[in-house]
Image (spheres, rainbow, N blue to C red):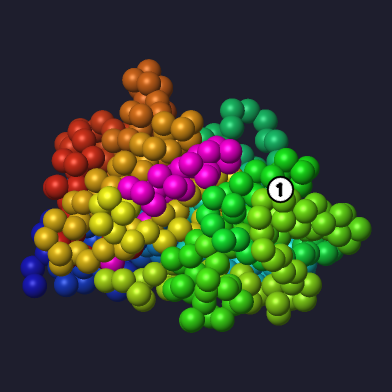
Amino acid sequence: MPTTASPALIEALQRAVGSQHVLHAPEDLIAYEYDATIDRARPDAVLFPATAEQVAAVVRAANQYDVPVIPRGSGTGLSGGTVPVKGGVVVALTRMNRIVEVDAVNRVAVVEPGVVNLQLQEALAPLRLAWAPDPSSQRICTVGGNIANNSGGPHTLAHGSTVNHVLGLEVVVSDGRVINLGGRVLDAPGIDLRGLFVGSEGTLGIVTQATIRLVPAAPDVRTMLAIFDSVDEASAAVSAIIRNGVIPVALEMLDQEIIKLVEPRIHAGYPLDAGAVLLIEVEGLSEGVAVEADAVIEACRACGAREVRSADTQPARDKLWEGRKVGIGAIGAAAPAFYLLDGVVPRTKLPQVMRRVLELSAQYGFKCANIFHAGDGNLHPNIMFDPQEEGATQRVLDLGGEIMRLCVDVGGSITGEHGIGLEKRSYMEWVFSPPDLAAMERVRLAFGSADRFNPCKILPGGHGCATGHADELARHIAKPGVYI
């Protein structure tokens, strides 16, 4: 089948990375039209570089033929961040998957962007070290994607998100130069361009190597499962735990809808009649862990927990966490499609926000399963629907917009870890003023990447981009497609 890309562009890309590492036939491009969201658009070509020099050559070729560049990891993003809405060249970084160095003494590692998060964790485990960001998609998501979206995970409550664990970056910028930001120390001199780059979602350049900070494994860990009759009680317990002076390393909530999907598959020990459960983990020296665990149990019982179970062995902890990690997959197996949202609210607002989320879902006629990082108020409502039902997709999008607006109205935000991407860029006007957004645009211009790297992402404006969320989706929505 013929390609829509210029033959001269394809030849230039093939020279840059080798012909076997360039896809341009329409049938080969289908899998790169989408990430794990609801939007879809086809690129002109997809290529797989192996070195920073090859990435730089690809960028220079794209410049020569005036086409956009879209960096991509494993495609697990949840905001449409890698959807090539204006066509262009998708730079898939999965071949760049080496762990270049692990310095256990100084707790530093150097990795390429295509390293899978879980593979990195497994490589570090024998050294009793870890990289703190641990998204629930860690079995497939890549370090480069984690950096692009400033990803979090269950353990960010105590350890912080990706930006807190990246020391230095090697990146290719829009003119094809390879530059270095940060270094091997926690507080490198000069303007913190490293911190600016983390979370920029591929709009400023392409990461080709990262120097990351490692954390030591805790001497002792206690994982607890607190069982409640209602989401209200579980939500109240979240604030009570922290009010008792404990910052757990993880504090996760699963509501009844998700428990009914997960437990029959995993048998993690979540009671099917529970209104909600909290998965709580504390770590540190054994004496401190015991004190903090007692404080957690006291707070949960004071808020109505009917039982608090403690897992003291690694197999028991693994079983509880397996139920959390497979939650999204369980939804995918149970529903024709679902739309996963990502918003943040103050912890004290959790009870009223959770009630309203379930009320809105019922009003729109959808089931909603909630599995999220309760400790930092990072909500993940999962709206289940059938895309073949007339009007269902638009209703889901309308519901998603209402939930995001609710988060903002109570003093929260429109993302906690999934990024803005294509999906939520028009919502940026809810949380930032025009001067704020103009300052962000000037940062892109300073990197020379406006309308060149990952166009139509993060910021609501952009040459040739739709101006509103509804307009954007109307232009690019997948029919049919992937909706998770």
Residue 449: x and y in percent read: 34, 36
Judging depth in this view, the residue of 102 and 393 nearest the camera is 393
Residue 113: x and y in percent read: 50, 58
Q: Which residues are magenta?
A: 337-360
Q: Using the rendered image of the protein, determine whether residue 406 is visible from the camera's viewpoint.
A: yes
Mark 1: secondary structure: helix
Residue 256: x and y in percent read: 48, 65
Q: Is residue 339 rendered magenta in the image?
A: yes
- The residue drawn where x is 18% and y is 37% is 466
- The residue drawn where x is 91% and y is 58% is 287
Horizontally, residue 114 falls left or right of residue 334, namely: right
- The residue drawn where x is 11% and y is 60% is 390
Mark 1 lies on residue: 241
How would you rate the neighbour count of disc 1 (Cα within 10 Å): few for under 14, some for 14-19, many for 20 or more? many
Judging depth in this view, the residue of 127 and 249 nearest the camera is 249
Q: Is residue 477 above or below residue 50?
A: above
Question: Residue most toward the top?
Answer: 435
Horizontally, residue 89 falls left or right of residue 237, namely: left
Question: Can you say which quadrant of the picture contains the C terminus?
Answer: bottom left
Circle 1: residue type: Ile
